[in-house]
Image (cartoon, grey):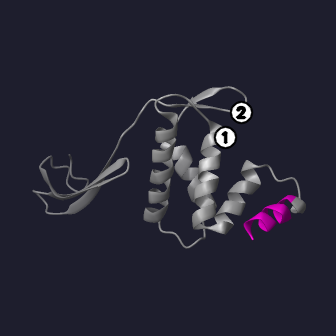
Amino acid sequence: MKCPYCTACETKVTDKRDCDSVTRRRRECLKCGKRFTTYERVELDLNVIKKDGRREKFLREKLFVGVDKNLQKRPFTSEEIDRVVDEIEANVYRVAKGKDIKSSQIGEMVMSKLKKIDKVAYIRFAAVYRDFADINDFKDELKKLK
């Protein structure tokens, strides 16, 4: 592992933590002494079947962008958002079992998670995901939340 500060190749792992689908390693450069964190993620070949039937490779980054966009200006740190995405991603892999998964299943997983952690983010996501046409759609969804 190269040090991002001095590009030396000699580093040591000072701490390691395993979470669902991520291994977090805290490292220290043996040359400059600076510390940094690396993350290992398992990548499986998984395709998402879109509404129009197209197949697309599952990309964690797209999932992160969608969740992050809905949690903007909400009381969440980037680490917390990362953990939320990790949980959804682990659930996607668990449900798919190495096969293709429908985009609608992923959307429902995201909605379910957002509903538990932040109602405003949930409504934001639902408005786009369920294609709300007018204010009545918002009212109906808010009634369900109460």
67 and 88: which one is in front?
Answer: 88
Rendered image quadrant of residue 140: bottom right
Q: Is residue 132 left or right of residue 45?
A: right
* Badge count: 2
Identify residue for label 2.
Answer: 51
Determine the residue located farthest toward the bottom in the rendered image. Answer: 75
Q: Residues within 10 Å of mark 1 (few under 14, many from 20)?
A: some
Q: Residues within 10 Å of mark 2 (few under 14, many from 20)?
A: few
Circle 1 SS class:
helix
Q: x, y (%) of residue 66?
A: 60, 51
State whether residue 81 appears in this view.
Answer: yes
Q: Is residue 10 left or right of residue 62?
A: left
Q: Is residue 140 magenta?
A: yes
State whether residue 71 appears in this view.
Answer: no
The relative height of residue 113 versus residue 129 in the rendered view (above or below) is below
Identify the residue at image location x=55%, y=47%.
63
73 and 34: which one is in front?
Answer: 73
Give the amino acid at mark 2: Lys
6 and 30: which one is in front?
Answer: 30
Identify the residue at image location x=55%, y=73%.
75
Q: Which residues are magenta?
A: 137-146
Rendered image quadrant of residue 33: bottom left
Mark 1 to mark 2 CA distance (whole Å)? 8 Å
Q: Is residue 93 left or right of residue 6?
A: right
Identify residue for label 1.
Answer: 104
Identify the residue at image location x=15%, y=46%.
9
Give the prevailing secondary structure in the magenta stretch: helix
The reply to whether dot 1 and dot 2 touch (C-beta < 8 Å) is yes
The relative height of residue 12 versus residue 103 in the rendered view (above or below) is below
Q: Is residue 122 magenta?
A: no
